[in-house]
Image: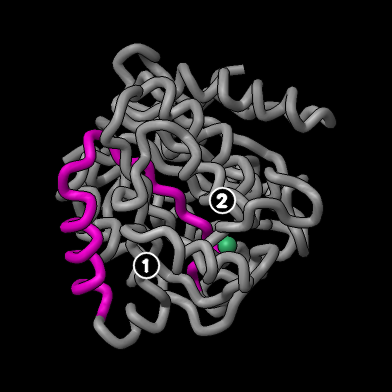
Amino acid sequence: MIDHTPPHRRVWSGLAGGDAQSAQVGILGVPFDGGTSFRKGAAFAPARLREITPHIAPISEEGRRFDALRVMDYGDVLVDLDWLRYFTAVRSRAGAVLKHPFALFLGGDHSVTIPLFQAFSQVKGGSGLGVLHIDAHADLMDTFEGHRWSHACTARRVLEYPGVSPEHMVFVGLRSWLPQELEYLSEHHGIGVHRAIDVYRSGIQAVAEAVAGQLADVKALYVTLDIDVLDPAHAPGTGTPEAAGLTTRDVLELLRVVFERLPVQAMDIVEVSPPLDSSDITSLAALKVIYEVFGWLHG
Ligand SMILES: [Mn+2]
């Protein structure tokens, strides 16, 4: 049968395919939600996000076309019930994706950032790595519910990898805490913290400037975007929603500055839970961010 589907009606709006070597963006799905503490469903995100892409044109919100951008989708790391074996596979599969100038990872719950960042740290090597953690939660627990890989431990594990110093770790959007996280932050200085209330009071532009200033000398930046940083009005489909959050516009304006000024080489979007979503609002918010990032990468 001859396929008459026009390119923009294909997965990733026709941007995928072609020569793998020359693709500017590598994509990997990590459909795992075994690290959640409350409601699950993030394992369904990579499939749902891809499924919606044929309905989005490769044009930025400002009207810039990026249909010449090439992306290479490496599919998903299929779930394995052995957690250690799974994270080992994620780390290894992420290695190839990180060879592209930009790597995009689709979670999964936030625990998947643990092996993804480990791969980032191995591939990019040395020192001078930066992390921008955009989230309602700090994820700074040493262990949670008996495990060091809970999605409440992500940032704590990331800070243990070589190459990341506390002053190159910045949080934006925090508004929910556990006592041990506050203790950790009071004992470890240098980490950047911009709470949701700071964004509300100072405005996202001021916060974005502060973030870009603090991370100005990093060699390679990893952005981890937990969709629950958004107010539940903007992203209801997530496992641990927190009221009084950021708008999708806030996140776009923050990332616009970050992508303009800093060497972002990888980003993950985690905690989108399609079964908990309403009318795909949360998946569409994630895709809005992804497609604007595509536009910025294309220049
Ligand atoms: Mn979170």
Distance of label 2 from label 1 (alpha carbons)? 20 Å
User: Which is nearer the N-term, disc 2 or disc 1?
Assistant: 1
- Which element type, helix, strand or loop, lies under badge 2? strand
Q: Please give the residue where the numbered disc 2 appears in the rendered image.
A: 270
Q: Is residue 72 left or right of residue 65?
A: right
- Which element type, helix, strand or loop, lies under badge 1? strand
**Which is nearer the eye, 98 or 217?**
217
User: Ligand 1 is found in which quarter of the picture?
Assistant: bottom right
**Which is nearer the eye, 93 or 215?**
215
Residue placed furthest toward the front? 187
Q: Quadrant of residue 126?
A: top left
Question: Looking at the picture, does residue 261 appear above or below residue 185?
Answer: above
Number of numbered discs on residues: 2
Query: Mark on residue 65?
Result: none
Q: Please give the residue where the numbered disc 1 appears in the rendered image.
A: 193
Q: Quadrant of residue 177?
A: bottom right
Question: Looking at the picture, does residue 3 appear above or below residue 29?
Answer: above
Three-letter code, disc 2? Val
Question: Looking at the picture, does residue 209 appear above or below residue 111?
Answer: below
**Which is nearer the eye, 208 or 276?**
208
Tell me where residue 38 appears, x and y as whole percent: 77, 64
Range drawn in magenta: 203-230
